[in-house]
Amino acid sequence: MAKSCIVCGKTHEEIPVTKFYYKESEFYICPQHIPMLIHKPTELAGMIPDAENFPAG
Ligand SMILES: [Zn+2]
């Protein structure tokens, strides 16, 4: 799996990306899209399994 932001697709070669885990999978997200993971996680549906059920922080 490429180290690229799940939202914008930028890779670790272009921008710092942080890794996170959900169940058995690993994902990467860039600083620009971390707020989305926190505040609007349901918008990540289709990018992360079950994201439509994530509670917003
Ligand atoms: Zn991004």
Image (cartoon, rainbow, N blue to C red):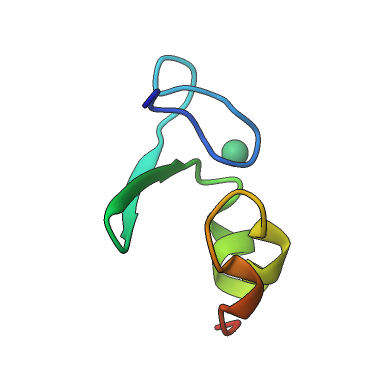
The answer to whether 31 is drawn above or below residue 55 in the figure is: above
Query: Which residue ends up furthest to the right in the rendered image?
Result: 43
Residue at image point 40% right, 23% down: 2
Q: Quadrant of residue 16?
A: top left
In depth, the one of 40 and 32 nearer the eye is 40
Q: Position of residue 28 (x, y in %)?
A: 41, 41
Q: Position of residue 32 (x, y in %)?
A: 60, 45
Residue at image point 55% right, 71% down: 38
Residue at image point 60% right, 79% down: 53
7 left or right of 11 in image: right
Q: Position of residue 46 (x, y in %)?
A: 66, 52
Residue at image point 53% right, 59% down: 49
The answer to whether 8 is drawn above or below residue 44 in the figure is: above
In depth, the one of 41 and 15 nearer the eye is 41
Q: Quadrant of residue 41?
A: bottom right
The answer to whether 44 is drawn above or below residue 4 in the figure is: below
